[in-house]
Image (cartoon, helix red, strand yellow):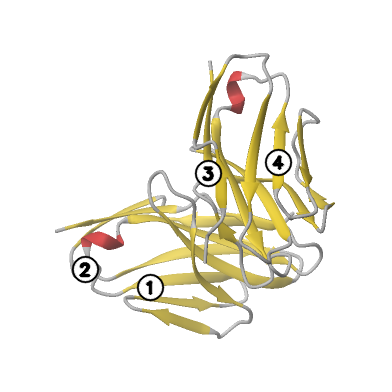
């Protein structure tokens, strides 16, 4: 069964304290792995798509990496405005359905 | 360019009633998906429409239904509401059936009392 597991569920960081969020997945053929950011009361906002193991994408303080079984979202020197829930989703080769993890709630303390 | 628009933003209904939610995708996007988001379950896939045809359906009871119109706008309907249907309902659109990711709307917060 296709599934996505994110850890930790919640993470509190001091401003400037770098860390990583994990997304492990099992899927019968990966079409793509997606990272989204969700702020309270809003819909998820697209961050990155990764398609193959070894691929990396960067955007400001965020860097996403992909292996055959998991993806990491590295946050370098975070700021309070990076506080949000980060969601990981996978899309299988068969069908177009996305499977989402339950997210990591990140709080960055000034 | 305008994003994905969902209406209404908030809705309070009584158990047993029915509700219709609306989604206008980004102009030119033909694929629309619906998700239910709850604190415990995260985002659960409801269904996906592409060019007025339902292409995928999640594991929800038949009380949940949807449709897509020729202008790509979509509606979802929930009949005989239950307390457990209280959730944030999110609509997402894509030009390529999700390949490359979806753009989400801000959602409709449904509360069933």
Q: Of label 4 and label 3, which has the lower sequence position?
A: 4
Residue A63 in percent (x, y) is at 41, 77
In the image, which is nearer the foreground, mark 4 or mark 1?
4
Residue in front for this viewpoint, B41 or A49: A49
Indicate the secondary structure of the residue bearing disc 1: strand
The CA span between labels 2 and 1 is 11 Å
Question: What label sits on residue B75 in the rendered view?
Answer: 4
Q: Do we see residue A106 in this rendering?
A: yes
Residue A80 in percent (x, y) is at 22, 60
Few, some or many C-alpha atoms within 10 Å of disc 3 (few <14, some 14-19, many ≥20)? many
The CA span between labels 1 and 3 is 28 Å
**Cβ–Cβ below 8 Å for labels 2 and 4?**
no
The CA span between labels 4 and 3 is 13 Å
Residue depicted at 41% across the width and 43% down the height: A41
Q: Are marks 4 and 3 on the same chain?
A: yes
Residue B92 in percent (x, y) is at 62, 55
Q: Kindly identify which chain the residue marked by label 4 belongs to.
A: B
Q: Kindly identify which chain the residue marked by label 1 belongs to.
A: A
Few, some or many C-alpha atoms within 10 Å of disc 4 (few <14, some 14-19, many ≥20)? many
Q: Which residue is mark 1?
A: A74
């Amino acid at each position: 069964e296709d599934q996505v597991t994110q850890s930790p569920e919640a993470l509190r960081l001091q401003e400037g304290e770098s860390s990583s969020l994990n997304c492990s997945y099992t899927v019968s053929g990966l079409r793509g792995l997606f990272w989204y950011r969700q702020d309270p009361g809003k819909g998820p906002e697209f961050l990155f798509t990764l398609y193959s193991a070894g691929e990396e994408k960067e955007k400001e303080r965020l860097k996403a990496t992909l292996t055959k079984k998991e993806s990491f979202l590295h946050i370098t020197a975070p700021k309070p405005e990076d506080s949000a829930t980060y969601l990981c989703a996978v899309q299988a080769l068969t069908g177009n359905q996305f499977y989402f993890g339950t997210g990591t709630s990140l709080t960055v303390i000034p | 360019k305008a994003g994905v628009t969902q209406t209404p933003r908030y809705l309070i209904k009584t158990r047993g009633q029915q509700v219709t939610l609306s989604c206008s995708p980004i102009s030119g996007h033909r694929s629309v998906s619906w998700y239910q988001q709850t604190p415990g379950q995260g985002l659960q896939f409801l269904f996906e429409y592409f060019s007025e045809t339902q292409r995928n359906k999640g594991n929800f009871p038949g009380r949940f239904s949807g449709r897509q119109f020729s202008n790509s706008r979509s509606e979802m309907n929930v009949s005989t509401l239950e307390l457990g249907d209280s959730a944030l309902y999110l609509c997402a659109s894509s030009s390529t059936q999700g390949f490359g990711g979806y753009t989400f709307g801000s959602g409709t917060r449904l509360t069933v009392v």
